Image (cartoon, grey):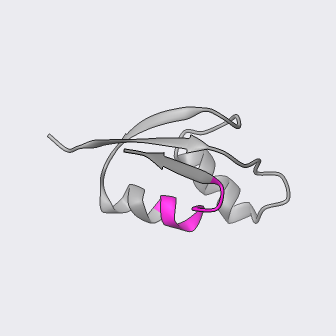
Amino acid sequence: MMAKISIKLVKSVIGTPEKHRKTVRALGLHKVGQVVEKEDTPQIRGMIAQVDYMVEVIE
C-alpha cells in the first residue's frame, strides 16, 4: 500500500494562473483551510510542486 499525504490549501486561488487553479481543483481542494488525503505518488508530488506556494503538505 502507498503512503498517504495530507495536503492543505493555505492560499486563495484568486488571481493565480488558470493552470494552477485547475491543479488545485484536481487535488480535490476547494476552500482555503481544507485538507485532503492523497496517495503519495510522483504524479501527486508533481502537482504539489506546481502549486507549492498555495498548499502545505502535512506528512
Q: Is residue 32 left or right of residue 6?
A: right
Residue drawn where x is 30% and y is 55% of the image: 41
The relative height of residue 36 versus residue 25 in the rendered view (above or below) is: above
Q: Is residue 42 left or right of residue 57?
A: left
Q: Which residues are magenta?
A: 47-54
Q: Residue furthest left?
A: 1
Residue 1: x and y in percent read 14, 40
Number of numbered discs:
0
Quadrant in which residue 10 is drawn: top right
Q: Nearer the viewer, residue 41 or 55?
A: 55
Residue drawn where x is 60% and y is 61% of the image: 51
Residue 11: x and y in percent read 72, 49
Residue 37 covered by magenta stretch: no
Quarter of the figure with the C terminus: top left
Q: Nearer the viewer, residue 28 or 40?
A: 40
The relative height of residue 43 versus residue 33 in the rendered view (above or below) is: below
The relative height of residue 41 versus residue 1 in the rendered view (above or below) is: below
Residue 13: x and y in percent read 76, 51
Q: Residue furthest right?
A: 15
Residue drawn where x is 66% and y is 61% of the image: 20
Residue drawn where x is 61% and y is 32% of the image: 34
Residue 48 covered by magenta stretch: yes
Quadrant in which residue 22 is drawn: bottom right
Quadrant in which residue 5 is drawn: top left
